[in-house]
Image: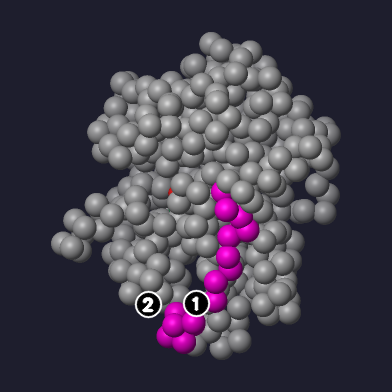
Amino acid sequence: MRFITSPQLNNKKMSYNVNEKGYYGEFGGAYIPEMLYPNVEELRQNYLKITAEPEFQAEFDALLKDYVGRPTPLYFAERLSAMYNTKVYLKREDLCHTGAHKVNNTIGQILLAKRLGKKRIIAETGAGQHGVATATVCALMGMECIVYMGEIDIKRQAPNVARMKMLGAEVRPALSGSKTLKDATNEAIRDWINNPVDTYYIIGSVVGPHPYPDMVARFQSVISKEIKSQLLEKEGRENPDYVIACVGGGSNAAGAYYHFLDEEDVNIIAVEAAGLGVHSGESAATSALGKVGVIHGSKTLLMQTNDGQITEPYSISAGLDYPGVGPIHAHLFASKRAQFISITDVQAMDWGLKLSKLEGLIPAIESAHAFAVLDEMKFKEDDIVVINLSGRGDKDLSTYIDYFKL
Ligand SMILES: *Cc1c(COP(=O)(O)O)cnc(C)c1O
């Protein structure tokens, strides 16, 4: 283990953001094997410098606009608002190319990889959504792409495996352990250690060793940047009263909160997956059940047994089925800046159907969790409530079909 400090970072204003040592409060850091140090250190030394370059920003913005389809609309949900007697706006990340917010981050990271002179991209994926977003940008840039995926996940997520193959990626099965996400992560790390010079590792959420959580949050922060200007245009003010997002690792949430973190008048609501119930033993409600631990190279809240073994998480939504949260969210929880709410499979699935019938929007099951907050909290008539609709439900159709016997 070797600890990485980051002297050139300066975020004094953003008290809920990462500090110069790579920490959010007590969470974060870079707890990595010695052999990964050169790779992570190269990234840490360069990410702020490169992403601040005007040419980088121009290329990033142009691809977000013409390739991803940004800005995504901020849609006033009239029927939903009438039903709950408050003003509900939906940030339409479901309209991004590939169907969710994840591509905002993979575009940013592949541009960075190119500028670092890397020729080969690796990633790991659980449900396959991050793998698809990575394979997409590799095709776009003509770069070699290897996606590690647990053998069991490969069987469970056949459509996403097919997408990655069509996009030219090689999907390598992780055959060890439980043959799921954490084993795929181990394989990706092993690959990176063996190929430190030409290979870049694209991580898909605000997790991993510093600087990944901060870097991914910055790429996703376009979400809250757009919300601000869109609300100003529609309501005459930049800040909503509430911003609500689901948290798996926490990248769509970090992006939706980013520019509101220091705006004390904005209430931040984080929604976790309670699965069959927080205390059922089948849940992914990390803030309710987690203790401080280290996962994927950062110190954060983590579901674990008394002797520190990671507990197998469960949620009907593959994207929320993760035993930790990014360190920024652990800090937002511990500092009470954000309010955490956990929502069960049943509540989320009911909202999947309800939002479809009410607004003509079939949400990703992850995103459907966020809407259930409308039943859990009371909002005032003139409150402005922004819900981040992180993705669309096409990928979840077979789960919806089985669940509702459609
Ligand atoms: C992957 C995914 C999530 C969860 O990931 P975060 O990093 O927590 O945002 C949420 N919603 C959708 C639609 C996803 O694809």
Quadrant (top left, top right, bottom left, bottom right) of the N terminus: top right
Could you tell me if the residues under marks 2 and 1 are in contact, i.e. CB atoms within 8 Å?
Answer: yes
Residue wearing tag 1: 77
Query: What residue do we see at 58% from left, 65% from top?
Result: 73
Q: Which residue is mark 2?
A: 358
Q: Residue furthest front?
A: 66
Crowdedness near tag 1: few (<14), some (14–19) or many (≥20) residues, C-alpha within 10 Å: some
Q: Is residue 307 above or below residue 339?
A: above
Give the number of marks: 2
Residue at position x 63%, y 58% from top?
A: 71
Would the CB of label 1 be found within 8 Å of ligand 1?
no
Residue 153 percent coordinates (x, y): 30, 34
Residue at the (55%, 24%) spot, across then down = 143
Q: Give coordinates of residue 53: x percent, y percent.
A: 81, 37
Q: Is residue 272 found inside the magenta-colored segment of the image? A: no
Q: Quadrant of the C terminus?
A: bottom left
Label 1 sits on a secondary structure element that is: loop
Residues shaded magenta: 68-84
Q: Nearer the viewer, residue 26 or 179?
A: 179
Given the image, on which type of amino acid does mark 1 rest?
Ala
Q: Is residue 2 left or right of residue 58?
A: left
**Residue 124 higher or lower than 108, as above or below:** above
Label 2 amino acid? Leu
Residue 286 position within the rendered picture, expressed as x and y whole percent measured from the top left: 45, 50
Q: Is residue 244 visible?
A: no
> What SS does tag 2 mark?
helix
In the figure, is residue 320 to the left or right of 330?
left
Query: Mark 2 vs mark 1: which is more N-terminal?
Result: 1
Q: Residue at x 55, y 26 (%)?
A: 142
What's the distance in space between the residues labelled 2 and 1, CA to CA? 9 Å
